[in-house]
Amino acid sequence: MEVTTKEYKGSKTIHRVTDFDGGYDPINGFYLSNQMFDADFETDLSKLNLSTLMCNSHYTKHLEDRNTDDIFKIVSLKSLDGTNEMQSCPPQEEKPDMFSYTPAYHSSPTLRSMCDWFQCDKARIRIFRQLPGQNVQLHHDFDNERCEFDPDNVTVRIIVNLSDTDSYFQLLNKTCNMTVKMQKGQFMIINTDTVWHATRNNDSVHRDTLNMIVKWNDWLERLTRASETLEIEKIKI
Amino acid sequence: MKEWQSIKIPDSDRSLTLPGGTPVVEWQGIKTKNFPALHGRGYFVDSSITDVEAVLPRSPYAGEELIISVIKNGNKFTLNGNGNNIDGEKTIESTVDQDTLILRYKGLDKGWETSHRVADFDGGFDPVNGFYLSKQIFDSDFTDDLNRLGLAIHIKDTVFDFKMLKSADGSDNMYTAPSGRIDPEMYSYTPAYHSSHELRSLCDWFQCDKARIRIMTQFPGQHVQLHHDFDNADHEQSHPKDIVVRILVNLTDTDSYFNLINKSCDMTVKMQKGQFIIMNADTVWHATRNNDELPRNTLNMIVKWNDWLSDITRPRETLELEKIKI
């Protein structure tokens, strides 16, 4: 059989990154970072004593229905009343100046440095401990619906994976479907109104994540901009 | 804003997990016969014995909420609006297990609306514009097959070594492709394919028409800059049967990464061994980097999009990792 071969089009210049007009869209998309925090989170996490946390008394109703195994244990690093235990927020927009840093934030030098590394205005900040074997079904949240989907006031969530466990996130939007085992120290940025998400922890130990609700800004835009060459950036904090 | 809820399913060791924002309701027992569904309550439904119908309140107030979780659905579950619309319909039906309906009454004009159901989600992997990173993970050892292929572990100033499993002339080393449209019938399986038991089973697991199939070995320290390819240049992308996608299966456990970017998403991922990507290489820009001291091997198949691929990439309500033994 005679075969006509074509030239490898990778040698052309028309598909350089300067020709690319896409990239992370904070209204409709998700970003999984090439930046990875290289730090000891365990020391801070062990002091937070998440296992004995109680839910806020305002929300005890749901405990009546709870199985003995909860899905998450949560401690707040920035909350409505500045306490570690307050996890909830009012039904309106989460404005960063409504929230105060908690004792847990001030007593956790590594976690504090990581929060501060992100140069953006932050509303609620929480540590989520997903317990072994637990999952959360596919759903979306309402962070931007509460801001009437104002394109000039976009709220995103930054989720940093703090553990090396056999646990997964699934993110879906209009074009992509990703099931990912995040690296320890890796983070994602998502618009939780439009990016549906599910989680599963298949490990025998808990998975800890830092979850920050923040306002989109130019610094985040620069951070997430596509680069011609893929480099994994290790961030020491 | 209410927090996560985990509700134990009666007579079961399972729990129903509901996300933040879900109303807190008073949960009832399992319903196996027709029943009236009331504001502020949650119902588990089992239609495995007979059809079950839930009838919503006739004159609800705006803001009324309830939850129905179909835990077993052997027959048919029907939700009857009792004169009010539900998502624009008089009734809605469910025939799948573990379908959870969170209902809110929005007034006479809008009627009842469901939210948070996967059925409400109209997105997902788009083979023209997007990428898919699998929840399916092959649980196999490809080492013996890879060792027999004689792939190089290092070639100076070179990024990849290749071995063909399906090629234009049926030989192991014909890397290039015929010009024009990508037609699976123009390619033949190679001796490397026939002699590689695990890799052959891996290829065959994917029920789609395949054109070129390559094993790509990315050498240590090597990277490929962000670019796109031209698989669909001679294809009609608006025709779902004429779309060409690439399937990339990661065969090794190395410190190596893919970067995939489209119009809305940017993902840098260290794939699990046995995990795969499906992407449209024309619209999804991609880069790779191998930071390991060992080569990274991937199976790279250029295939035609079809209904089977559509089905395996479809979102499900609950995230389950599927380990595939081949």
Image (tube, rainbow, N blue to C red):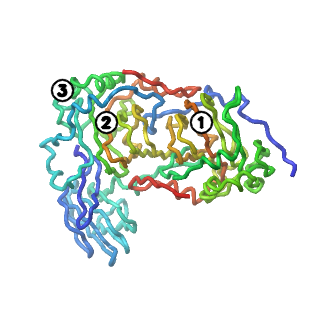
As measured in the structure, the alpha-carbon distance from the residue carrying label 3 to the one carrying label 1 is 44 Å
**Left/right of residue A200 with respect to residue A65 in the rendered view:** right
| Residue B225 appears in view | no
Task: Please name which of the two marks, 2 or 3, marks the residue nearer to the observer.
Answer: 3
Task: Please name which of the two marks, 2 or 1, marks the residue nearer to the observer.
Answer: 1
Where residue B276 appears, as percent x and y from the top left, is 55, 47
Which numbered disc covers residue B252?
A: none
Query: Of marks 2 and 3, which one's residue comes earlier in the chain?
Result: 3
Q: Which amino acid does label 1 sit on?
A: Trp
Quarter of the figure with the N terminus of chain B: top left
- Whether callout 2 and callout 1 share a subunit is answered no
The residue that mark 3 highlights is A103
- The answer to which of A203 and B46 lies nearer the viewer is A203
- The answer to which of A52 and B254 lies nearer the viewer is B254
At x 53% / y 41%, what residue is drawn?
B253
Q: Residue furthest left?
A: A57
Subunit that carries the residue with mark 2: A
